[in-house]
Image (cartoon, rainbow, N blue to C red):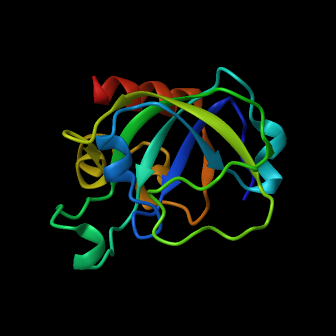
Amino acid sequence: MAFVYEGCWIFCSNPGLWAIDKFLLSGPRDDSWGVPLHQARHFARGQRGFIRVGVDSRTKKQLEGRPRMRPGIYAHCEVRSAARPDTDKPDPYWYETPTDRVRPSVKLRYLRSFLDKPLLIDTLRLIAPDIDPLVLRGFRQASFPISRKTYRRLLELLD
């Protein structure tokens, strides 16, 4: 699949691996995000993106009484660094410690959380069916680029 890199991103979160809901409840802040090696050179400080949560298949034990998350857009963020080897210690929101392999990551600043009112993918399909199909379908990768047009449209729908 050929991507066009315009400095806008979707960061894909699997709540079965990382408790994104607990992370967002703790208050938006800086964090790091692992990115695919083949995309690393395309990241730069000041780029923007969204956190897209996929299917929540967590166990009752993992949910700890919280409701399942529905697929959707849950946060707006800014890239705060170029990609670099990930040497950060895993945060407490991981259900299992990630592998020890060094992978590239970028620093992210969470600009706004939509945990209480996410833009659900089901809703997005109804109100913006012409939006980038990868945003609607999801993509089994840590991140993927989106066009500036898609970025602006998502931002508009979230306001």
> Residue 40: percent from the left, percent from the top?
80, 45
Check the image and report above or below for 131 versus 157.
below
Quadrant where the N terminus sits is: bottom right
Quadrant where the C terminus sits is: top left
> Is 141 left, or right, of 91 in this rendering?
right
Residue drawn at the location 58% of the way across and 69% of the way down: 97
Residue drawn at the location 61% of the way across and 51% of the way down: 143
Q: Quadrant of residue 128?
A: top left
Q: How many marks?
A: 0
Check the image and report above or below for 111 versus 58.
above
Check the image and report above or below for 52 versus 44.
below
Between 144 and 142, the residue placed more toward the observer is 142
> Is 44 left, or right, of 57 in this rendering?
right
Between 126 and 34, the residue placed more toward the observer is 34
Residue drawn at the location 67% of the way across and 29% of the way down: 7
> Residue 41: percent from the left, percent from the top?
84, 40
> Is 65 left, or right, of 22 in this rendering?
left
Check the image and report above or below for 150 versus 15.
above
Residue drawn at the location 39% of the way across and 26% of the way down: 155
> Residue 146: percent from the left, percent from the top?
58, 39
> Residue 45: percent from the left, percent from the top?
71, 23
